Image (cartoon, coloured by chain):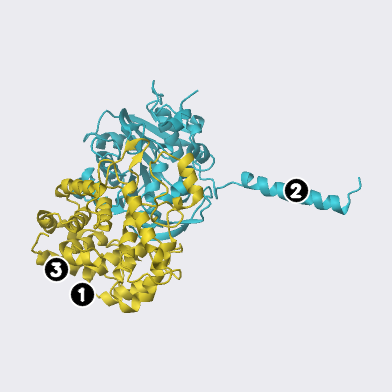
Chain colours: A cyan, B yellow
């Protein structure tokens, strides 16, 4: 077949246009595959917040081959705001139990760090939610991530299109970052678990209260970029008293009676989602995170402790997220 | 106006601690453990030191002048690459009495005038009116964002109103100021929480009335100190009067004292409570330390914010 110069130019242009359109969908948006070959998740049944948490959590952590000897451990609870009677924040007793456990495991230091997303007065949230006195009594240092030293950090994924974020030194220099979310439904993202909990490391001093730029760039996309850039090494999720409905602030407390421990944030969140009665693959950041951040498939998760059973009635969510549980 | 005897010892102790935390560059870091100067704590510290014979106010002012962005705004920290942020309002307030800073302040005012919440654009107005209505607000009433390319929020709007209220003249392009300020004030009224006071700026979300925050309410009330008769303001003052006596967090307590003083409410007992809080001297947060100084010397602080009582 004879190809004229005109045909050649048209075909070349068509090929170039096709490549330009399809390439963004074919090129991975993450820099590296951070998935473990297999992940481990433990679900512990815990009825209430009590001093017993120390013992229960220590026993739970023994199910994992953790080595934190000589390491700087940063515990990142979910500490958003304080509203009396609401199950908004990770319970301080669980955070204290975690700090004590990691100290016993030989950590060089254990720091609790958070940058509340709604309240500018971090000390007010700390005192009202029961953290301040507890941390002081146990001589545990707290770092306000909203005001910590800022370091410009290139993102290791490009879901938002942002090239970098200014992130707090305490988190970037941590040897072992533990995400300690409260298990909640969330009106913008469906759920807020260990991955969404990382919004708290984004400094309010640089991005405002709330951290509005993350909403404009896409919440699911921001979660993925953040988790790719600031790897979560371990998860201890507070689901003893969880939240359903209009979370993260104004939902309804719901007794779940569980603590979820994991060495992989995607596996942890997929498990939490199942415990809430949701299909994990319908949550964008869990589905996409399973491509490079961790494992969501039960086949790749070693389940220890209790078995994961979906509740008879799924967690309530705002109407936009009913697809998380509907057939 | 109530009269309060300033606890001179508490104030001098806090000022001394503040002076100790000043960095060689002239600025202050947000946290005592950090050596990275930041604009917000530097501004509060500079306001707190004022003409006091402690610290080096001139070095602080030089630091602020050095760190201004070419476009007239101020960054959060030196070296920040974004096109400025809300701290621009606080910086121009701090530099008010400094004659060599007049050109810098004018550039700052112009930047503030050109900066507005994203909802001021017709496209986003349309989005918020049609597709995105879970947060109840009127996009026609817009103020200032924390940072460009996001929507308006209460605190940056309140600080911009305070800053633009200090303009000495309406020369050049500055005749737009009254219109912008009025729009910002309407935005504050629109974003109030149904039960009184303000939070970051979401009064009702998913039909659910949201709770107010003390510091956001206090800062908004400072900006609305000449609107005391407005029902939204009165309701916010009542909220603050109700909550402030229960506070033990110095940042919120200090802002409450300033706001209630601006609205001519009794603050003697709050002032005593703040003086009695011993823990603020050990606080990591330098901004809080400076705020405590300002609240303990509230008449001077209100004057610096341009609030006449």
Rate crowding at label 3 as few (under 14), some (14 to 19) or many (20 or more) other CA atoms within 10 Å. Answer: some
How far from the left and from the top, in percent, is residue A298? 48, 30
Instruction: Name the residue: 48% across, 40% down.
Output: B130
2 or 1: mark nearer the eye: 1
- Secondary structure, mark 2, is helix
Which residue is labeled 2 in the image?
Answer: A15
How far from the left and from the top, in percent, is residue B30? 30, 62
How far from the left and from the top, in percent, is residue A117? 35, 48
Q: Pointer 2 and pointer 1: residues touching (CB < 8 Å)?
A: no
Instruction: Name the residue: 34% across, 47% down.
Output: B190
Q: Pointer 2 and pointer 3: residues touching (CB < 8 Å)?
A: no
Judge whether residue A250 can be spotted in this image: yes
- Quadrant the C terminus of chain B occupies: bottom left
Which residue is labeled 3 in the image?
Answer: B12
- Secondary structure, mark 3, is helix
Instruction: Name the residue: 17% across, 63% down.
Output: B298
Rate crowding at label 2 as few (under 14), some (14 to 19) or many (20 or more) other CA atoms within 10 Å. Answer: few
Which residue is labeled 1 in the image?
Answer: B51
How much space separates mark 2 and mark 3, taking CA atoms?
A: 74 Å
- Asked whether the residues under marks 2 and 3 belong to the same chain, the reply is no
Name the subunit of mark 2: A
Name the subunit of mark 1: B
How much space separates mark 2 and mark 1, taking CA atoms?
A: 70 Å
Residue A255: assigned label = none
- Quadrant the N terminus of chain B occupies: bottom left
Name the subunit of mark 3: B
Of residue B279 and residue A100, the one placed in the foreground of this image is: B279
* Mark sitting earlier along the chain (3/1): 3
How far from the left and from the top, in percent, is residue A158? 54, 50
């Amino acid at each position: 077949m004879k190809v004229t110069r005109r045909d050649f130019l048209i075909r070349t242009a068509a090929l170039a246009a096709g490549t330009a359109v399809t390439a963004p969908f074919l090129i991975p948006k993450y820099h590296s595959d951070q998935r473990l070959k297999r992940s481990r998740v433990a679900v512990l049944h815990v009825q209430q917040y009590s001093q017993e948490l120390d013992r229960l959590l220590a026993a739970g952590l023994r199910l994992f081959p953790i080595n934190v000897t000589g390491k700087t451990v940063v515990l990142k609870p979910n500490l958003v705001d304080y509203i009396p009677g609401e199950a908004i924040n990770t319970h301080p007793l669980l955070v204290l139990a975690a700090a004590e456990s990691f100290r016993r495991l030989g950590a060089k230091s254990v720091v609790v760090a958070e940058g509340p997303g709604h309240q500018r007065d971090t000390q007010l949230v700390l005192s009202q939610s029961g953290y301040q006195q507890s941390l002081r009594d146990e001589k545990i240092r707290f770092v306000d991530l909203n005001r910590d030293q800022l370091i410009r950090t290139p993102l290791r994924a490009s879901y938002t299109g942002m090239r970098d974020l200014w992130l707090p030194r305490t988190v970037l220099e941590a040897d072992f970052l533990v995400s300690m979310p409260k298990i909640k439904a969330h009106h913008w993202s469906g759920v807020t678990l260990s991955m969404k909990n990382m919004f708290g490391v984004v400094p309010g001093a640089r991005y405002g209260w709330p951290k509005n730029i993350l909403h404009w760039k896409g919440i699911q996309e921001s979660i993925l970029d953040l988790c790719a850039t600031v790897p979560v090494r371990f998860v201890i999720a507070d689901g003893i008293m969880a939240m359903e409905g209009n979370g993260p602030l104004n939902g309804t407390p719901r007794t779940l009676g569980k603590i979820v421990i994991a060495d992989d944030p995607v596996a942890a969140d997929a498990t939490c989602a199942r415990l809430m009665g949701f299909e994990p693959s319908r949550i964008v950041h869990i589905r996409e995170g399973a491509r490079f951040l961790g494992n969501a498939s039960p086949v790749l998760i070693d389940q220890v402790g209790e078995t994961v059973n979906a509740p008879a009635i799924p967690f309530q969510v705002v109407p936009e997220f009913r697809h998380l549980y509907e057939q | 106006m109530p009269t309060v005897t300033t606890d001179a010892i508490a104030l001098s102790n806090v000022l001394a601690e503040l002076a100790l935390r000043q960095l060689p560059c002239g600025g202050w870091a947000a946290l005592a453990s950090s050596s990275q100067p930041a604009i917000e704590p530097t501004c509060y510290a500079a306001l707190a030191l004022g003409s006091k014979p402690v610290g080096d106010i001139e070095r602080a002012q030089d630091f602020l002048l050095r760190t201004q962005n070419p476009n007239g705004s101020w960054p959060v920290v030196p070296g920040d690459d974004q096109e400025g942020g809300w701290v621009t309002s606080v910086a121009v307030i701090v530099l008010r009495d400094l004659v060599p800073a007049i050109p810098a302040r004018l550039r700052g005012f112009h930047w503030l005038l050109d900066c507005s919440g994203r909802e001021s654009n017709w496209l986003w107005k349309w989005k918020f009116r049609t597709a995105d209505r879970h947060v109840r607000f009127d996009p026609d009433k817009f103020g200032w964002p924390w940072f460009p390319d996001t929507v308006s929020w209460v605190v940056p709007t309140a600080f911009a109103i305070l800053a633009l209220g200090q303009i000495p003249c309406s020369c050049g392009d500055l005749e737009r100021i009254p219109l912008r300020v009025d729009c910002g004030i309407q935005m504050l009224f629109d974003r109030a929480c149904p039960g009184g006071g303000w939070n970051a700026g979401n009064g009702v979300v998913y039909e659910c009335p949201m709770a107010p925050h003390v510091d956001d309410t206090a800062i908004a009330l400072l900006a609305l100190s000449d609107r005391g008769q407005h029902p939204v303001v009165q309701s916010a003052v009542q909220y603050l009067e109700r909550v402030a006596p229960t506070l033990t967090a110095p940042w919120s307590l200090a802002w409450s004292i300033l706001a209630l003083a601006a609205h001519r409410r009794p603050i003697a007992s709050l002032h005593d409570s703040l003086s009695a809080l011993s823990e603020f001297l050990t606080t990591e947060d330098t901004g809080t330390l400076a705020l405590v100084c300002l609240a303990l010397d509230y008449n001077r602080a209100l004057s610096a914010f341009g609030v006449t009582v």
